[in-house]
Structures are given as C-alpha cells and as structure tokens.
Image (cartoon, grey):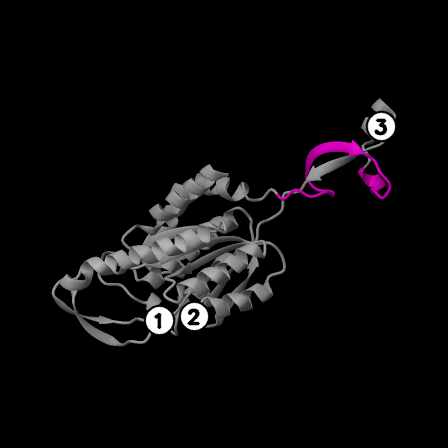
Amino acid sequence: MVAVEQYLKPELASQIKRLDLRAQMVVKGFLQGMHASPFHGFSVEFSEHRRYSHGDDPKDIDWLAFAKTDRYYVKKFEAETNLTGYILMDTSRSMNYTYRQQLTKFDYCICLAAALSYLMLMQQDPVGLVTFDEKLKASIFPRSRRSQFAAILSQLTKLKPGGKTSLRGPIEQFMAMLKHRSLIMVMSDLLSDTESSADILRMLKHAGHDVIVFHVLDEAEVTFPFQGLVELRNPENDEMVSVNADDIGEEYRANVQAFRSELKAALLQSKIDYVPLDTSVPYDKALMEYLISRKNRF
C-alpha cells in the first residue's frame, strides 16, 4: 500500500495507520464473515452431494462417489465471492464545521473513508468512493488492485464542502449505477428531511444491499456547550440567529437526542446499521467498537 502521508495531512495519516494496527484482526473476521454467498455452481468450497438429475452439468459428477455407490451424484459448492463496497460521503457545506475539535465533520469522514477503503483492500475486496451534496459529485469505480487506495486518497484531498445536504436525489442516482449486491457505507450529518432520508436508505436496503449509516455530528452539535447570548449560523444557508443558550440548551439537546432516536428506530426496522458518531470520539476507537459489535452479531 502507498504511504498515506503522501496524500493526507499528518494528523489524519497517523490516525489511519494506527487504526490498521489496532483493528486488522477484527476487520479480517468482520469482512470475511460477509463473503459467504451460497449458490449452486462450480466454485472453491465443497458443500455437499445430491443425486444427479436431468439438466445438471456432467462435469460436476463426483466419479469417486459413483465408484463407491454405483449412483451418480453431483457436488454442491458454496462460493466465496468478493464483496463490493461503496463509500458514500456527504460533502455538503454543513460538513465543514467544528467548534472546538481538531477535525471538522468533513475531516472526520475523510478519516473514516480512508480507513475503511484501506481495510477492505487488505481483504482484496473492491471498494469505490462516491461523493454527494444535493447531487452526485465525484466517484471512483470499485476496484481491488493495490493502486486503488492511492486513487481514493488522491480524490479525498481534492474534495471541498459545498451545497446543501440531500440524500434522496443522490441515492436514487446512485442506485441506478448498481449492478449487484454491495456493501454501502453512508457518511453524513443527515441534516436534511429525516423522513425522506430514512425512506431512501430503506429503499437501498430493500434493493438487496447491505447498508451502514455513519451519522457524524460535531461534538458541539450534540452537547450544545454554549452559554449566554450567542450567534448561531445555519450551516446549510449561512443564516445567523441570536439566542440565549441558557434558555434553549436543554430543549436543544433533547431535540438532537430525539432526532437520532427517530433515525435509529426507522433504520433498524429495515435492518440497516445505524452508527451515531460525534467528533469528540476518536474515529479509530469508534470504528473499532462498531466492527466488534457487528462481528459479534454474525
């Protein structure tokens, strides 16, 4: 793999390298556990015998079994196929926010995208990158070759946040591109219509894809650490509003919790993994915890 320092600023590069050292055993089990895709046909792993019937390929006959039983049997196999991964990264204007953390939401998602790309490529799984705001932006077709990591990192360094957050339009466009079952990893602050976002993510799942949603908010957007009179800016349209933080803090935090809970309930109902994150939690620690919890469920 190419040195990450060539493409990312040092603090991001060091975090990605650290993730690899801490997580590779967990990730190996996690990704390999998702590869099994049973179907009849010639492949790599023998499963069981069944009686030969008209229409079966004679090449699948087990002649050793015939010699022992004087009956024709064919071998059934369980294929192990590569899992194609797509990282869908929100590059809207609201992602370029931080209050007091080292990384903006945008930087945080760059770390996640780079780490997951690297870890999938370690497993020789093809992975691609698709970016969006109100519409699809840059994309890199999934590949499993060694140069793919450099291509993804190079693209990540060129990204600039802009535009409003929207999931429905971009994901509808994205679904039209998909040819077979894939692992879709969505990274966004989801600062758009909650019901519409949940609906389009459920459509993605119902189309047969495995979907993981990394819901990334800034630490200040979750905890609302402000006091007294403050001016807040709407990250989607730059509109400014003056508020007394002491008066609205409790209600704000309750609304954020309700926002997350509503999303989680809607997505889990469709068996979509929902991973709430905020930028105060080191992304490698958060990803490790998620991978361990997911591995334990399979």
Measure the alpha-carbon separation of dots 3 and 2: 61 Å
Q: Which mark is residue 93?
A: 1
Pick the front one: 41 or 126: 41
Residue in the image at 26% along x and 56% along y: 254
Q: Dividing the picture into quarters, in which one does residue 103 lie?
A: bottom left
Going from the N terminus, do you reach mark 3 or mark 2 first? Answer: 3
Pick the front one: 85 or 140: 85
- Side (left or right) of 42 relative to 150: right
Query: Tags 3 and 2 in contact by the CB under 8 Å rule?
Result: no
In the displayed structure, would residue 183 be above or below residue 133? above
| Amino acid at dot 3 | Phe
The residue carrying mark 2 is: 133
Q: Position of residue 6 (x, y in %)?
A: 40, 60
| Amino acid at dot 1 | Arg
Residue 85 visible (yes or no):
no
Q: Residue furthest top?
A: 68
Query: Tags 1 and 2 in contact by the CB under 8 Å rule?
Result: yes
The residue carrying mark 3 is: 66
Magenta region: which residues?
A: 37-60
Measure the alpha-carbon separation of dots 1 and 2: 8 Å
Element at badge 2? loop
| Amino acid at dot 2 | Asp
